[in-house]
Image: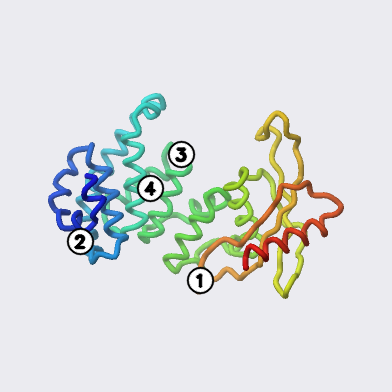
Amino acid sequence: LQPFKDSLNYGLENYDKLLKLMPHIKYRGDIIDLSISIYNSDLESKTTIKDNNDTVLEYFKVDLENYSKQTEAEREKDFTYNNLIYSYLKYLNTVKSKNESSKTVTLSIINGDFNKWMKLQAITANIINNNPISKNIIDTYSEDLYLRFEIMEAYHKQKRLSELNKNFLKPKEFAKLSFYNYAGEDYGYPDTLKVTKTITKNEEDFYVIKFSYNSENLEDSEVETNYIGIVGPIKKIDQNIDFKIFNALSYWEAYNDDWEQQAEKIISDLLDFKD
């Protein structure tokens, strides 16, 4: 299907014909991904894609059932169903759907024996599509810093941020979440982190972060250490403001008695990066 991926307009013109290939599993994932690309494009395509939701999602249930039947060894050799499930979930996180079957399937992923990232995509798909999902599930998964930002972002997109646990909207909690994501992308997700101090510079607040990694997550040559990092400037978390994580920075230096001098240097660098 590469020609249709190269020319989304060509894909849109032949969309009805392409959908007739959905019964063939070797084309299914490509058609779902193409549908997402067309929907996200500048083409006047959103109505066409939405009108065919049921066709795109027709095999979601059976594909998940087949994925569930695979052993771990089979999944490591054949990624067909794994990739398909992620394509369906990406579609549902992009194109709003009232497809009843997909509601049931995504809930079965959330409540079933599936990996954390797949469950997260199912949760956000339900939020994006305004499907009922228990507050207990949202609170439980949001406690995990690895999952929280995407859940919060989905609620913000739907203008439903006020439905979240108010604790997650507090500046210090969001600062911890911001640093967790920053560190995870750079070096590795910290096992512990806390806000220790607040420093005001140029009339803006910055939080000093102390964080560490458990010994079992370190390389043989590494020693368990408390490190220093900075998050800021600190902003209000609000439905009417663009939703993005706070800036964060660390040089993975040990947190020590000279923490104020360390913090000042990092804040200065953070402000330079900001400018």
Could you tell which of marks 2 and 3 lies nearer the N-terminus? 2
Q: Residues within 10 Å of mark 2 (few under 14, many from 20)?
A: some
**Residue 48 — which label?**
2
Q: Are marks 4 and 2 in contact (CB under 8 Å)?
A: no
Helix, strand or loop at label 2? It is helix
Q: Considering only order in the chain, which callout, 2 or 4, is on the residue closer to the N terminus? A: 2
Q: Nearer the viewer, mark 1 or mark 2?
A: 2
The percent coordinates of residue 96 (x first, y second) are: 31, 60
Residue 235 pos. (x, y %): 62, 69
Residue marked by disc 3 = 115
Element assignment for label 3? loop
- Residue located at (72% from left, 75% from top): 203
Disc 4 vs disc 1: which is toward the camera?
1
Which image quarter holds the C terminus? bottom right
Q: Which residue is mark 4?
A: 107
Q: Nearer the viewer, residue 74 or 4?
A: 4
Q: Earlier in the sequence, mark 3 or mark 1?
A: 3
Q: Secondary structure at mark 1?
A: loop
